[in-house]
Image (cartoon, rainbow, N blue to C red):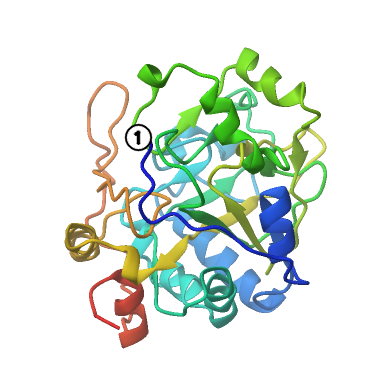
């Protein structure tokens, strides 16, 4: 019943951060972009967020409420309004050392990139309680082996009190064992699997504990999609606006013709897809309110159109290597 095509395994030791990715399921790669570039990308992201309602003021936390913000796709995450194709998002995805890191993982620089989301976490929101953990993996139980490595281009300080990625280190090494002990009739091909509290106890009984990933502006966080993880909320002590860009890469040779067709359609229509760059391509439609109405601020094109070059089109799957 398992899907085994396109699987891959790391075969260290490597003597670098890839050893952490292999053994712990995640790694932090320091200073992949400069602090100045990270500040630039964060400013562009916050300018984008501020463009929806003049009542929203970054210097006034009382204005950090839902009615002043675009609709979130997930907790603190935005993938509507063509944001995934904003110029600054493509610039960040094309950073040379980001590409180099994923080329080291996969052993090739002929990569595809995901059209993934922007996360802006405003601390101490007054209009909603802190979100509970939602531990999950972004790989179907029907897949075995390493299929996807996810990434976060970190643009803000992520200290112990700030919002950041939460992981169960080493869970990538036992997730498949967990699924082997579950009823296969409950498995889905969908590449996300949420865990209940009793299921998480399976991992904690094996000595695994959640950990907040600490990082600085300009760092790149990577993790195996079999690693149990979620977006961690800031504590009340934090005043940091978490700002990150999600970006995953995989070899172009792994993509089918249908995958490339869907990526090209997403590129033309400025739509988001999923965390996956080479499979599991789901075109994201514009978001709607709970009452079913479309946000009148919806956009069908970015505020700043990207300036595509050959390398970007190759990453998008629109130009052959």
The answer to whether residue 303 is seen in the rendering is no
Q: Nearer the viewer, residue 229 or 36?
A: 229
x then y, percent, for residue 277: 38, 59
Q: Is residue 160 left or right of residue 220?
A: right
Q: Nearer the viewer, residue 242 or 9?
A: 9
Q: Secondary structure at mark 1?
A: loop
Badge count: 1
| Quarter of image, res 228 | top right
Q: Residue at x 31, y 78 (%)?
A: 314
Q: Is residue 102 left or right of residue 51?
A: right
x then y, percent, for residue 174: 64, 35
Establish if 12 lies above or below 297.
Answer: below
Q: Is residue 300 left or right of residue 62?
A: left
Q: Which quadrant is home to the N terminus?
A: top left
| Quarter of image, res 209 | top right
Q: Nearer the viewer, residue 270 or 112?
A: 112
Q: Is residue 78 left or right of residue 133?
A: left
Q: Look at mark 1 in the image and give the residue it sits on.
A: 190
Q: Residue at x 48, y 60 (%)?
A: 248
Q: Which quadrant is home to the C terminus?
A: bottom left
Establish if 146 lies above or below 177.
Answer: below
The answer to whether residue 124 is seen in the rendering is yes
The crowding category of the residue bearing disc 1, from other C-alpha atoms within 10 Å (few below 14, some 14 to 19, many at least 20), is: few
């Amino acid at each position: 019943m398992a899907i085994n095509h396109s699987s891959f395994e790391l075969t260290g030791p490597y003597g670098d951060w890839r050893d952490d990715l292999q053994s712990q399921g995640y790694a932090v790669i320091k200073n992949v972009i400069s602090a100045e570039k990270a500040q630039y990308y964060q400013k562009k992201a916050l300018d984008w967020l501020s463009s929806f309602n003049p009542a929203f003021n970054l210097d006034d936390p009382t204005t950090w409420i839902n009615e002043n913000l675009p609709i979130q796709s997930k907790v603190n995450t935005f993938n509507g309004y063509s944001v995934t194709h904003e110029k600054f998002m493509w610039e960040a995805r094309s950073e040379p050392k980001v590409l180099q890191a994923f080329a080291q993982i996969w052993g090739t620089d002929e990569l595809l990139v995901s059209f993934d989301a922007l996360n802006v976490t405003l601390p101490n929101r007054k209009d909603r309680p802190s979100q509970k953990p939602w531990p999950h993996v972004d790989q179907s139980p029907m897949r075995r082996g390493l299929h996807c490595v996810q990434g976060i281009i970190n643009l803000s300080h992520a200290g112990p009190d700030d919002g950041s990625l939460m992981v169960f280190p080493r869970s990538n090494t036992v997730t498949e064992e967990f699924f082997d002990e579950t009823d296969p009739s409950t498995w889905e091909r969908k590449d996300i699997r949420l865990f209940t509290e009793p299921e998480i106890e399976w991992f904690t009984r094996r000595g695994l504990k959640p950990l907040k990933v600490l990082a600085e502006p300009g760092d790149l966080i990577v993790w195996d999609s079999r690693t149990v993880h979620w977006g961690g909320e800031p504590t009340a002590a934090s005043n940091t606006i978490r700002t990150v860009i999600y970006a995953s890469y995989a070899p172009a040779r792994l993509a089918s013709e249908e995958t490339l067709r869907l990526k090209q359609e997403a590129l033309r229509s400025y739509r988001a897809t999923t965390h996956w760059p080479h499979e599991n391509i789901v075109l994201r439609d514009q978001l709607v309110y709970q009452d079913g109405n479309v946000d009148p601020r919806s956009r069908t094109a970015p505020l700043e159109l990207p300036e595509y070059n050959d390398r970007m089109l190759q990453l998008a799957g629109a130009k052959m290597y």
